Structure formats: structure tokens, C-alpha cells
Image (spheres, rainbow, N blue to C red):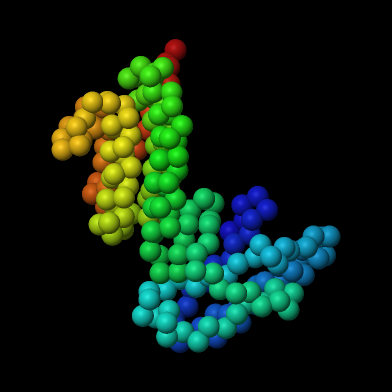
Amino acid sequence: MLFADDLQVYFSFLPHYLEIGVHRLNTDIATVVVWATSNGLSLNVRKTKAIILASDPYYHQLNLQRDALNSVKLPYSAKVQCLGLWIQTSLDWSRQVGSASGRVYGVLRVLRRLRRLLSRQNRKELIETLVFPHLDYACAAYDDLFDYQNLQLHRALNACVRFVVGSISRREHVTPYRIGLGWVSVIRGADTSRLPSRTPALLRVPPRTR
């Protein structure tokens, strides 16, 4: 897969075909190197990463052999970032969830300084514009989350609701206020077909007819 100057090579194989898989990837890498060299380009070894995706039981049984780039052995990474999405070896999405929730709280820290200057509608629109993209980005890719990961995202959204409403006690349920704002849950796997409805209305205005 090629995106701008970012090339990614994927290959699937059964665990007992690991040696064949690594050999095939090395062959593909060598082909890319030849093509790049013939076109006056060079590959950045320091930015090149390799990762094996497998369940934990399979992964720990593998006799890992490194891929090579220009005779340089590439270490296997525990996690890589693909177009903003963090992918881990066992497809555990804790790094991605942590990144998304961290960005949410980062935006909230900035907005809280301006809270007194903003109307409720302004606060709602700012959350939808600046926060929701972090919660919704690639949400279809990491739908199967553990309960604690869903809770992490849920609490981040609740913090946004409290920022907008501003008068919710600690013991009070936030859900009615979230529904009142027209926002759906961020719980992955609950009803992903409803996730796009959290998109700001300005992106869903139907085209005018003449």
C-alpha cells in the first residue's frame, strides 16, 4: 500500500510458514530497493519498521527472523502507527485508545481556560469540531475493545458533556445530558451504525436543488 511517500507491504501466512513469509518479505524489500535506486531514491532505514500481527499464544511460539533492508536487520516493533492509527502486535488497541483519549483531554484543557467566554452552544460546537474527530477517527478499525478500553473512551466523552453542561454533580448520571446534546455513545461494538450521527450537522446538510 502506497500513501504519499509511505510504502507499506503486507503478507499473511500460517505460523509454521514464518521462514517462508520472512523470505518473501525480504524479496519484496529487495525489489523496492532496486526500484528506488534506479530512480535516484534511497530508503530511510531508520524509519523502516517491521511488525508481526498474531495472537499472544502464537506470537510467543515464533522463532522470529528479522527482515533486512540493505543488509541491515530490522528489529520487530511492538507497535507501529499507520496513518494515525496505532497497531499493536496482538491487535490490542490500548495504545490507540490511550492516544485518542489523551487528545480529548488535551483539547479540554485548552477549552476550559475559555469556558466563561463561551456560550453553551459555542462549547457544544467546539467539542463536536475539535474533539469528535479524535474519537471517531478509524473507529471502524478498532471496534472490538475490552471493557476497560470502552470505559476509558466513555469517561473521555463524559468529560466533554460536563464541559458543555457545566452543572452536573459527581453522583449524577451523565447519560441523559449526553442524549440531550444529541450525542451517541462511544462504546465500541454497541451500535457502530450510529457512530456517524455524531458528526456535526454542518457536514450533513443536503445539497440544494434548483
**Residue with the most extreme top position:** 210
Q: Where is 47 relative to 205, above or below?
A: below
Q: Where is 94 relative to 128, above or below?
A: below
x and y percent of residue 24 in the render? 60, 78
Frontmost residue, 79 versus 105: 105
Frontmost residue, 156 versus 6: 156
x and y percent of residue 119 in the render? 35, 17
Q: Is any atom of residue 20 visible in this view?
A: no
On-image quarter of the C terminus: top left
* Residue at position x 62%, y 77% in the image: 67
Q: Where is 37 relative to 199, above or below?
A: below
Frontmost residue, 59 versus 13: 59
Quarter assignment of residue 176: top left
* Residue at position x 21%, y 30% in the image: 168
* Residue at position x 43%, y 79% in the image: 59
x and y percent of residue 179 in the render? 21, 31
Q: Is any atom of residue 34 visible in this view?
A: yes
x and y percent of residue 162 in the render? 28, 32
On-image quarter of the N terminus: bottom right
Q: Is residue 196 left or right of residue 67?
A: left
* Residue at position x 73%, y 78% in the image: 71
Q: How many marks?
A: 0
